[in-house]
Image (cartoon, rainbow, N blue to C red):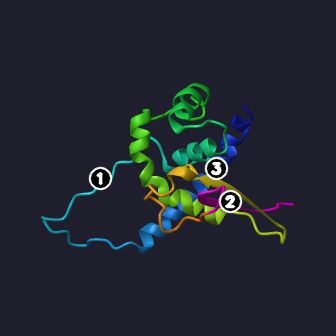
C-alpha cells in the first residue's frame, strides 16, 4: 500500500506534537504538592506504545480504505506494519487506550494538519432517509427535527471542503 512510505513522516510529526503537548500539559496542570492519604495514586510507568504511535495508527486508519478498525488493526497493522511498530498492543488493549489519545489526536489534527482555506469551497449534500414514507407517522426518533415532503422523509448531510492548491 502507498501509506507505508508515509508512516515515518506522520510518526515524526506526531511525536514532535506529543512532546510539545505533554510539556504544555505538565506546565498548566495542577499538581498535588502534599497528597493526602485519600488521593488516588497515579502510575508513572510509560506504556508499551507511545501516544505518537497510536495517533499515527489512527491517522493511517482514516486515510485508508478499510471499513472497520478491527480489520485494519488485525490484518494490516499487525501483519504489514510490524517492522514500523515493534511494540504493538493487542487489539482490545489498543481500543481500551484509544480514549487516552482522543484529545491529543483532535488537537494534532486541528493545529497541525488542517489546511488553510484558499477561498474556493466545495459544498455537497446528500439525503439520509430515516424510514419509508408510509411509516413516517410511527417514527419517533426524528419526530421534531425532520423535514417532510411527498417523496422524502429524513435528514440532509452537508459536506464542506476547501480546495487545496
User: Where's the C terminus, which quadrant?
Assistant: bottom right
Structural crowding at the residue carrying mark 1, measured as other residues with C-alpha within 10 Å and reported as few (<14), some (14–19) or many (≥20): few
- The answer to whether any part of residue 48 appears in the image is no
Specify the label residue 12 is tagged with. Answer: 3
Q: Is residue 10 magenta?
A: no
Would you say 147 lies left or right of 121 here? left
- Quarter where residue 6 is shown: top right
Real-space Cα distance between discs 2 and 1? 32 Å
Q: Nearer the viewer, residue 153 or 55?
A: 153
In the image, farthest residue toward the right: 165
Mark 2 crowd level (few <14, some 14–19, many ≥20, 10 Å Cα) = few
Coordinates of residue 138 in the picture (x, y in percent): 44, 55
Residue at image mark 1: 43
Range covered by the magenta-colored residues: 149-165
Residue under label 2, please give it.
113
Distance from the alpha carbon under mark 1 to that under mark 3? 26 Å
Q: Nearer the viewer, residue 148 or 4?
A: 148
Give the mark nearest the N terminus, 2 or 1. 1
**Secondary structure state at the residue bearing disc 2:** helix
Amino acid at each position: 500500500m502507498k501509506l507505508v512510505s508515509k508512516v515515518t513522516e506522520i510518526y515524526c510529526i506526531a511525536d514532535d506534537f506529543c512532546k510539545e503537548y505533554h510539556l504544555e500539559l505538565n506546565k498548566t496542570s495542577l499538581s498535588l504538592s502534599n497528597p493526602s492519604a485519600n488521593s488516588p495514586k497515579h502510575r508513572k510507568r510509560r506504556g508499551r506504545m507511545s501516544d505518537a504511535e497510536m495517533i499515527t495508527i489512527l491517522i493511517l486508519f482514516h486515510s485508508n480504505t478499510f471499513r472497520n478498525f478491527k480489520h485494519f488493526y488485525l490484518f494490516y497493522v499487525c501483519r504489514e506494519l510490524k517492522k514500523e511498530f515493534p511494540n504493538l498492543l493487542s487489539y482490545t488493549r489498543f481500543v481500551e487506550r484509544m480514549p487516552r489519545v482522543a484529545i491529543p489526536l483532535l488537537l494534532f489534527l486541528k493545529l497541525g494538519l488542517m489546511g488553510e482555506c484558499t477561498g474556493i469551497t466545495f459544498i455537497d449534500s446528500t439525503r439520509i432517509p430515516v424510514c419509508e414514507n408510509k411509516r413516517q407517522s410511527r417514527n419517533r426518533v426524528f419526530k421534531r427535527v425532520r423535514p417532510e415532503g411527498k417523496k422524502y422523509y429524513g435528514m440532509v448531510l452537508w459536506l464542506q471542503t476547501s480546495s487545496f492548491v
